[in-house]
Image (cartoon, grey):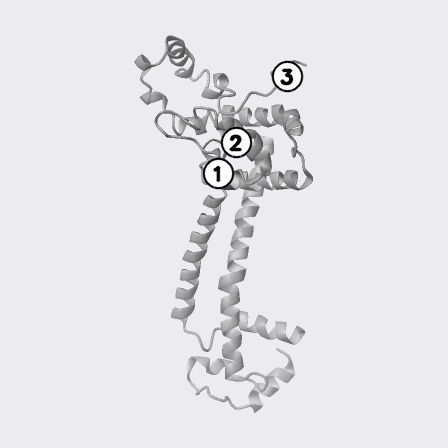
Amino acid sequence: MRDLLRRYWRTLWRPSAYFSLGLLTLGGFIAGIVFWGGFNTALEATNTEKFCTGCHEMRTNVYEELRGTIHFTNRSGVRAKCSDCHVPHNWTDKIARKMQASKEVWGKIFGTIDTREKFLDKRLELAQREWARFKANDSLECRNCHEYNYMDFTRQSKRAFDAHSRSLESGEKTCIDCHKGIAHRLPDLTLTQQ
Amino acid sequence: MTPEDSQMKRNVRPLRVEAGSPAAHHEPTQQESPELRRTEEFRTFIFLTVIMAPVLAVMGVGGYGFIVWVYQMFAGPPGSGLH
């Protein structure tokens, strides 16, 4: 066994006697293309709704609630899926979020929110984490679709027009400050006052 | 390389490799027939491109993600630094 390892170790570091540089370089290059394509495909697969709702924690709680909202079904048929709002689109932040998901795997294995009651108990914490994230990035995931510059104020209600032109334009407020609980139900907010 | 190795190299004539060819520096020894060496080189190449490089790349990207996560624990969620 040690002899075998030593032979392969030597093969690893000396020039190839039987395979041309062209074959080795091109072979490595093509393998690199295949790998990168596969990597991105796998990354995208983890961004699909099917993947997210593969766990009953997501399917029976947050996804079920989303189904009734305007972000799921509306007159124009444009809709938001989980990752549109909850996974950063920027590469570095996306990779960091994917690694954070290892904690969700942990939660899945140990049943952290495997019943509706546990989910409701934990919901405020979960929501506050997302709110803090939206607040910090100036509601970036909202703005990926809803652009302030293209809002036609004449088609907004008086109340919306007032709020948007006063607080949103100045940057004093960001989307999430007012639009909480629009895609999923609000947590029990009386808990925040304790 | 042990002294025995170099001893062996001097005594054994190359089997198929002609002097002056690129492979002449790496004369096969007694334990190593050209067929074996070819197989070993092929397996090493496949191992590097199909297993080791992808695994290292995924570990690198994953490690980077974890580092950014730890950074975000102190600096706040993405976007905090810009304000």
Residue occupied by mark 3: A192
> In the depicted view, which residue is nearer to us: B80 or A56?
A56
Which of the two labelled residues, at mark 3 and mark 1, occupies the earlier sequence position?
1
Query: Do discs 3 and 1 belong to a common subunit?
Result: yes
Which of the two labelled residues, at mark 1 and mark 2, occupies the earlier sequence position?
1
Query: Do discs 1 and 2 belong to a common subunit?
Result: yes
The CA distance from mark 1 to mark 2 is: 9 Å
Residue occupied by mark 1: A49
Q: Is A81 left or right of A189, judged from the image as shown? A: left
The residue tagged with tag 1: helix, strand or loop?
A: helix
Q: Looking at the image, can residue B34 be seen?
A: yes
Residue type at the position of mark 1: Glu
Q: Chain of mark 2?
A: A
Q: Position of residue A29 (x, y in %)?
A: 41, 61
Residue type at the position of mark 3: Thr
Instruction: Write the residue at 39% across / 9% down.
Output: A162
Q: Is A91 left or right of A130, judged from the image as shown? A: left
Q: Chain of mark 1?
A: A
Q: Quadrant of the C terminus of chain A?
A: top right
Residue occupied by mark 2: A63
> In the depicted view, which residue is nearer to us: A61 or B54?
A61
Residue type at the position of mark 2: Tyr
Q: Looking at the image, can residue A14 be seen?
A: no
